[in-house]
Image (tube, helix red, strand yellow):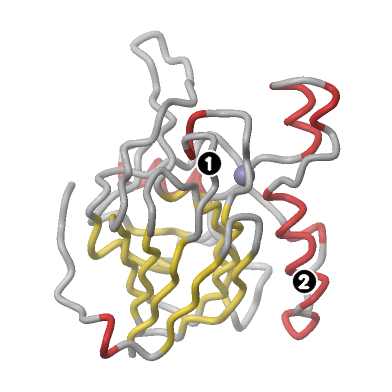
Amino acid sequence: MIVESQLEPSEALCRDVVSAGDYYMKVVKKGQTVRILDIEGNQAADTLFYNANDPSERYSAIDTIREQGNVYLTAGTKILSDQGNVMLEIVADTCGRHDTLGGACATESNTVRYSIDKKCMHACRDSWLLAVAENEQFGMSKRDITHNINFFMNVPVTAEGGLTFADGISGAGKYVELKAHMDTIVLMSNCPQLNNPCNAYNPTPVEVIVWQ
Ligand SMILES: [Zn+2]
């Protein structure tokens, strides 16, 4: 569902451009709104959410899909935790839908999906592991990395129930915006993937904008 935002970037609290292959790990406070902007289009922002006051509570794809009765995320989606609490709500979306079934890329999955010589290519899981290692204040480690949302990524479910990685439906300047219902750690890997059409074989930067 396409819903445009009324928020002005010039009035934002902070703005961060995240290069492809880099990560973003910051707390968005309860009541604040965070926008992820697909600057050049066809990018994938692989994102995890945690309760900032207790990171053992985290985003649950299973609970979110079940409660909304839909596999795609878009405006109106309540992002639920594994304890059934609303963490954030998607309040604006100019892309239209986002994936939470496809998972993130990892060096291991790259070898299975593409070829064995992809083992050394940078993957989202590496960026998350680097993020938790470089941000000890959150007290998180490898064991906290779970399933995620792929903002802007197009993973349509076929009529037969299959999953396909398809060319992106996002474009330059499209965004998704979420209002936080709790203090939330946003851990995002801006995907460096070069082997599938989800980011048009051309990883590009995204911007994260937070409003009070
Ligand atoms: Zn990735």
From what the image shows, is residue 163 above or below residue 205? above
User: Residue 50 location, x and y as percent?
Assistant: 58, 69
Q: Disc 2 marks which amino acid? A: Met
Judge from the rendering whether residue 114 lies leftward or rightward of residue 212; answer left or right.
Answer: right
Asked which quadrant contains residue 114, the reply is: top right
The mark tally for this picture is 2
Q: Secondary structure at mark 2?
A: loop
Q: Residue at x 44, y 59 (%)?
A: 80
From mark 1 to mark 2, how far is it between C-alphas? 31 Å
From what the image shows, is residue 11 above or below residue 182? below
Q: Which residue is under mark 1?
A: 202
User: Residue 167 location, x and y as percent?
Assistant: 41, 29
Q: Quick check: which quadrant has ligand 1?
A: top right
Q: Which mark is residue 109?
A: none
User: Residue 209 location, x and y as percent?
Assistant: 39, 77
From what the image shows, is residue 148 above or below residue 208? above
Q: Disc 1 marks which amino acid? A: Asn
Q: Residues within 10 Å of mark 2 (few under 14, many from 20)?
A: some
Front residue of 64/25: it is 25
Q: Which residue is under mark 2?
A: 140
Q: Residue at x 59, y 70 (%)?
A: 24
User: Residue 115 location, x and y as percent?
Assistant: 78, 20
Q: Secondary structure at mark 1?
A: loop
Q: Residue at x 37, y 63 (%)?
A: 37
Q: Residue at x 31, y 66 (%)?
A: 177
Front residue of 142/2: it is 2
Q: Residues within 10 Å of mark 1 (few under 14, many from 20)?
A: some
- N-terminal-most mark, 1 or 2: 2
From what the image shows, is residue 19 above or below residue 8? above
Q: Report the quarter where the C terminus lies.
A: bottom left
Looking at the rendered image, the disc whose residue lies closer to the viewer, 1 or 2, is 1
